[in-house]
Each structure stands twice: as structure tokens, then as C-alpha cells.
Image (cartoon, helix red, strand yellow):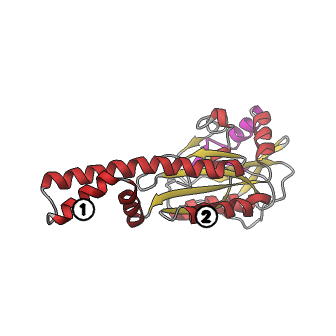
Amino acid sequence: MSTYVYGIIRASHSPLRQDLDGVGDPPRPVRRLRQGELAAIVGDAPEELRPKRRDLLAHQRVLGEAGADGVVLPMRFGSVSPDDDTVTTVLAERADHFLERLEALDGTAEYNIKANHDEESMLRLIMADHEDTRSLAEANREAGGGTQEQKISLGEMIAAAVQEREATDAELLHQALTPIAKAASAGPHSTGWLANLSFLVERRSAEHFLAAVDEFRHKHPHLELHVNGPLPPYSFVEPSSQQPEGATAEAFRNAGAQPNE
């Protein structure tokens, strides 16, 4: 039977709860595989594994339980190994790498921030900042809406201004929060978000980081910020020079989606 891998911890990590269940229907028990100074948090892999909400939450719950008692190197949802022996072999072969990453991530958490525009506030800003757009909008309104060509032209001008502002605001968000974090990582672009950023934050500095997020939100009321965290440091498993693919990412076959997408 294949082995589902949740994450990697130090062998000295506190024991997991004996009743901790993971993915699968019914949920499969969670256990540890030890190899030298390392251990992997694993369970039997379901035959048909899909990124359903129940299993995504189970994956996060296991990592959350483990992370509450010490640093954990999280695997993405769907990380599967052919068997237990393969897992311990990987731990042995890449021990130096895993131990270095555990040390680097100790005492940290990930905060994912997605941003988009409040449409009404954004439109007011565009009209205030772009005289040509404002003039055309006023001319169209006085003409009872304007010609079809004028309507298309106004729409194109607004779209271009929104696109320009999206790039500007994404960079402003990055510049405002990166100095407060240990590291930052841009997530995959998705429709509806102008920014999808993850920040590696010292747990002891989390309150300061969240206060900075609130300050940024107050200064830029046309932006809607969605904060998810604290999370296991999914986006920082690899050193920045190796993202997005690296020694850890290649260690196990990934059959699912990222929990924080």
C-alpha cells in the first residue's frame, strides 16, 4: 500500500496524539516513520485521492497538530510515496537538506495574503486620477450615454487604468510587508486577485506583522485584503533559490492541490 506523507519533523519532536486521523474515508490513522534524526508523519494512502474539502482539512489539521509542538516541514496535499521504505530512504538520503530546512523554519509560520480591488472605490480613484477618462465619462453622460464607439473607448481606458493600478498596488503591498517578514513568496496567479503573496513570519512577531497589514488596509481603502494564517510554511519548504521545485518538492509524487491556493 502507498504511503501518504504529511510532513517531516525532527525525531525528537513531541509524540502525536494516538487518536489523530488523517485523509481518507474512513479517515486513516496517522503515524511516524523514524530515520536517524528525522521522522516523517505518514498514513496509509487512500486508493482514490482527490482534493476534496474533507481531505484538505484533514491534511491541514494533522500539520496544525504537529506544528503546535514544534517545527514541521509540510508536504503539499497529495504527497504520496510507494511505501514506508521509500520514505525512510528519502529521509536518509536527504537528511542534511531536511535538517537545514527545519532549522531555518523553526519558530515561523506562513501568512498568505490575497488582495483585490473594491470596484466602486477603484472607479472613483480612476476618475480622480485620470483627467482624460473623467472627461470622456462626463461627455458620454451629457450625451445620454455616448455613441457605441465612445462607450468602447471609455471601457478600454478604464480597463487599462485598472490593470496599471493592480500592478502598482501589488508592488506596494509587497514593499510594505516584506521588510517585516523573514521571507516573501509570490503565489500562482489566479483570477480575481491582483496579488497572492505569502510571508514567512516569526511567530513572536506575528502581532506586529498583522498590525502592519491593518495599517496598509487603512491607508489603501480601495483594496480588499484576505489574510490566511498562521499556516505551516508551505511556500518556504525550499530555499528561495530553489523555488518552486527543489529537493523536497521532488521527494514525493504530488497528486493534489495546494491547501492555500
Q: Is residue 96 left or right of residue 20?
A: right
Seen from the viewer's position, the closer of residues 133 and 184 is: 133
Label whose residue precedes the other's in the sequence (2 or 1): 2
Measured from the top left, where is residue 69 in percent x and y?
81, 60
**Which residue bears the numbered disc 1?**
138
Please tell me whether mark 2 or mark 1 is closer to you in this view.
1
Classify 196 as above or below 119. Answer: above
Residue 197 visible in this rendered orientation of the protein = no
Considering every residue shown, the one lying at the far right of the view is 12
How far is the residue under mark 2 from the one under mark 1? 61 Å
Q: Are marks 2 and 1 in contact (CB under 8 Å)?
A: no
Q: Amino acid at mark 1?
A: Glu
Residue located at (46% from left, 46% from top): 167
SS of the residue at dot 2? Answer: loop
Measured from the top left, where is residue 79 in percent x and y?
Answer: 60, 46
Residue 30 shown in magenta: no
Residue 12 horizontal side relative to residue 214, left or right: right
- Neighbourhood count class around disc 1 (C-alpha, 10 Å): few under 14, some 14–19, many 20 upward: some
Going 78% across and 61% down the picture, which residue do you hit?
16
Q: Secondary structure at mark 1?
A: helix
Which residue in the structure is indicated by mark 2?
A: 27
Q: Quadrant of residue 110?
A: bottom right
- Which stretch appears magenta? 73-93
Residue at 87% over, 51% down: 12
Residue 141 in view, yes or no: yes
> Which dot marks residue 239?
none
Q: Position of residue 95 (x, y in %)?
A: 78, 36
